[in-house]
Image (cartoon, rainbow, N blue to C red):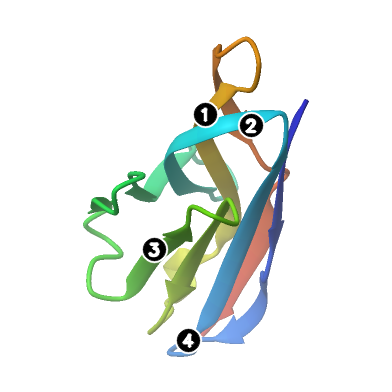
Amino acid sequence: QVQLVESGGGLVQAGGSLRLSCTASGSIFRINTMGWYRQAPGEKRELVATITRSGGTNYADSVKGRFTISRDNAKNTVDLQMNSLKPEDTAVYYCNSDLLIEGIYTRYNAWGQGTQVTVSS
């Protein structure tokens, strides 16, 4: 079984910063791409940022220059540093991992439970 646990959400004023963290645990052989997605009320879930095992990154245009994704392969963690936050960044943020299950080496796409980020104007 695999678990992703997020932390670091909260309420912040526009222009402020937050750092989200996610730890993957369980029967994991290897984690490939890790990422963050978000979903605002009434909206579809959208990609925020992804990072490959070798450190290659991809960002949504709306967060480029403000958000930074990073990971620690040894600890199975992925972080999202969010600066210059805007009210439109308000959403539930979800951690995602594309991984291989230990022992059976089956590919599995795991999601965290989500953490609320609210940016006030």
Q: Residues within 10 Å of mark 1 (few under 14, many from 20)?
A: many
> Which residue matches tag 4?
14
Res 28 quadrant in image? top right
Q: Nearer the viewer, mark 2 or mark 1?
A: 2
> Which residue matches tag 1?
99
Amino acid type indicated by mark 4: Ala
> Which residue matches tag 2?
28
Find residue 37 and report its horizontal and vertical position in percent. 48, 46
Earlier-in-chain disc, 3 versus 1: 3
Kindly report the distance in space between the C-alpha atoms of the residues bearing marks 4 and 3. 20 Å
Marks 3 and 1 in Cβ contact (< 8 Å)? no
Earlier-in-chain disc, 1 versus 4: 4
Kindly report the distance in space between the C-alpha atoms of the residues bearing marks 2 and 4. 38 Å
Marks 2 and 1 in Cβ contact (< 8 Å)? yes
Marks 4 and 3 in Cβ contact (< 8 Å)? no
* Left or right of residue 52, residue 107 in this image: right
> Which residue matches tag 3?
69
Between 40 and 25, the one lying in front of the other is: 25
Residue at image x 66%, y 53%?
23
Label 3 secondary element: strand
Find residue 97 and report its horizontal and vertical position in percent. 52, 37
Residue at image x 43%, y 90%?
15
Earlier-in-chain disc, 4 versus 3: 4
Earlier-in-chain disc, 2 versus 1: 2
Earlier-in-chain disc, 2 versus 4: 4
Kindly report the distance in space between the C-alpha atoms of the residues bearing marks 3 and 1. 18 Å
